[in-house]
Image: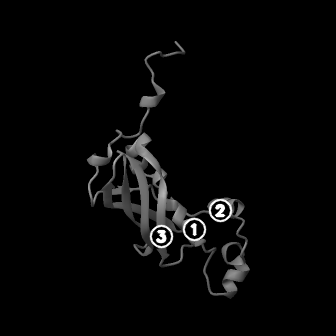
Amino acid sequence: MTRNDNFNPSQHSMVPERGFYEFQIGEKFFAPSRTMTEGIFTAFQAASGDNHPIHYDRNYLAETGHPNLMAHGFMTLIQAAIGASPLAHSLGKNLIGFIDQSSKFLKPVYCGDTIYPIFEINELSPNKSTGVMGLDIKIYKQNKELVLQGIQRYLIRL
């Protein structure tokens, strides 16, 4: 049998979908850890067009005192995309869009570092048909250093 008429692609979900009112302030979500490889550096350079030698030239980095390729701040920040975490999958079709973001880059991230993104709900503001979910974001390195912190806000269907 190659066809299963009982299979429904819209029910193929990693986690159960939850409504806006089912989330709680203080609830945490974790994205998988990721080691920052040369491939990620290359992909970011291709996508961003950023070709400053501080991110791609080991000789330049050695002359400026850095031990390895240094990640662009945005390259670190994109590791905090909620789509890589169970949160976005829990929101499912209720997630309308990304509306606000700010971040502080606290420590350098180098090629070979492994980072660990964490999202914590800090705001749930309902309106008439939509609401805003705010998140504190933190990214740690393998040595337990906090390298990035900030906020993100999303528009959610009620």
Q: Is residue 27 left or right of residue 15?
A: left
Q: In which quarter of the image is the C terminus?
A: top left
Disc number for residue 145: none
Please tell me which residue is depicted at 66% across the width and 87% down the height of the picture.
64
> Which x, y percent locates residue 89?
42, 44
The front one of 135 and 5 is 135
Disc number for residue 44: 2
> Which x, y percent locates residue 109?
54, 73
Question: Decide: marks 2, 1 in contact (CB < 8 A)?
Answer: yes
Check disc 1 and give the amino acid type. Phe
Give the distance between the C-alpha atoms of the residues marked 2 and 1, in whole angstroms. Answer: 9 Å
Extreme front residue here? 128
Give the distance between the C-alpha atoms of the residues marked 3 and 1, in whole angstroms. Answer: 11 Å
Disc number for residue 74: 1
Q: Is residue 47 left or right of residue 128?
A: right
Label 3: state its secondary structure.
strand
> Which x, y percent locates residue 142?
44, 69
Q: Of marks 2 and 1, which one's residue comes earlier in the chain?
A: 2
Residue at label 3?
A: 102
Q: Of marks 3 and 1, which one's residue comes earlier in the chain?
A: 1
**Where is residue 140, by image quadrant?**
bottom left
Please tell me which residue is depicted at 67% across the width and 81% down the height of the picture.
61
Is residue 96 visible to us here?
Answer: yes
Check disc 3 and give the amino acid type. Ser
Check disc 2 and give the amino acid type. Phe
Please tell me which residue is depicted at 37% across the width and 56% down the height of the picture.
133
> Which x, y percent locates residue 47?
68, 59
Q: Of marks 2 and 3, which one's residue comes earlier in the chain?
A: 2
Disc 2: CA contacts within 10 A as few (<14), some (14-19) or many (>=20): some
